[in-house]
Amino acid sequence: MQETFDFFLFCEGQVRAASTFHLDGRFNRDYYNPEELSDLSENFISWKNIRPVVFSMIQGKRVPTKMKLVFALPSPYYEKILQQGGLSLSPSDIGGLYLHVLYENDTITLVTGTSLNLFSMDKTLDRYWDNFISSWIEQHFDADKI
């Protein structure tokens, strides 16, 4: 309900409550006029804009039996991630930096993912992204209670 994840893009999700809702975070480009499309630099909607819709699905006295949310870091942050991690990749080499959040059986599981636009056996970006998200979670949440 808070704004903590608002800077992330929302890729997809699923909420299983009284019914199962599947959410696709991709912009429906046919919905927008050409002027609005020029302002859309990413393919996905921001969590800030979709959050009220998702929370409307889970309001009530019962928690969902399952919820899966897939977030992506907006591409303007790639340069900063590469610099902080001391990585030799360029931002255009990155296809995506992801965070999967799964709630099921009263447990929250976080899984990171990376996608490159080139083939590499080097897992330095994967390890840095894992550590970055771990630190970010510790800064924003009491991880022992999650």
Image (cartoon, grey):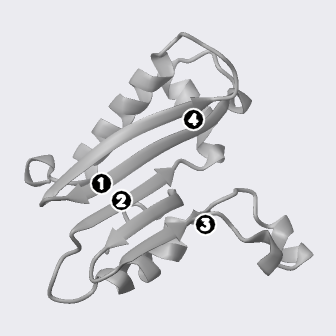
**Among the two numbered marks 2 and 1 on one chain, the one whose residue lies closer to the N terminus:** 2
Q: Residues within 10 Å of mark 3 (few under 14, many from 20)?
A: some
- Which mark is drawn over residue 80? 4
**Residue at 56%, 18% in the rendered image:** 87
What element does badge 1 sit on?
strand
Whether pointer 1 and pointer 4 mark residues with C-beta atoms closer than 8 Å, the reply is no
**Among the two numbered marks 1 and 4 on one chain, the one whose residue lies closer to the N terminus:** 4
The residue tagged 3 is: 45
Between the C-alphas of marks 3 and 1, the distance is 19 Å
Say what amino acid the circle numbered 2 marks.
Lys
Say what amino acid the circle numbered 3 marks.
Ile
Q: Residue furthest bottom?
A: 60
Say what amino acid the circle numbered 4 marks.
Lys
Between the C-alphas of marks 2 and 1, the distance is 4 Å
**Among the two numbered marks 2 and 3 on one chain, the one whose residue lies closer to the N terminus:** 3
Q: Is residue 119 left or right of residue 146?
A: right
**Among the two numbered marks 3 and 4 on one chain, the one whose residue lies closer to the N terminus:** 3
Q: Position of residue 121 (x, y in %)?
A: 54, 10
In the image shown, does 5 or 64 lie closer to the viewer? 64
**Residue at 23%, 44% in the rendered image:** 138
Say what amino acid the circle numbered 1 marks.
Leu
Q: Position of residue 44 (x, y in %)?
A: 63, 60
**Visible residue check, residue 121:** yes
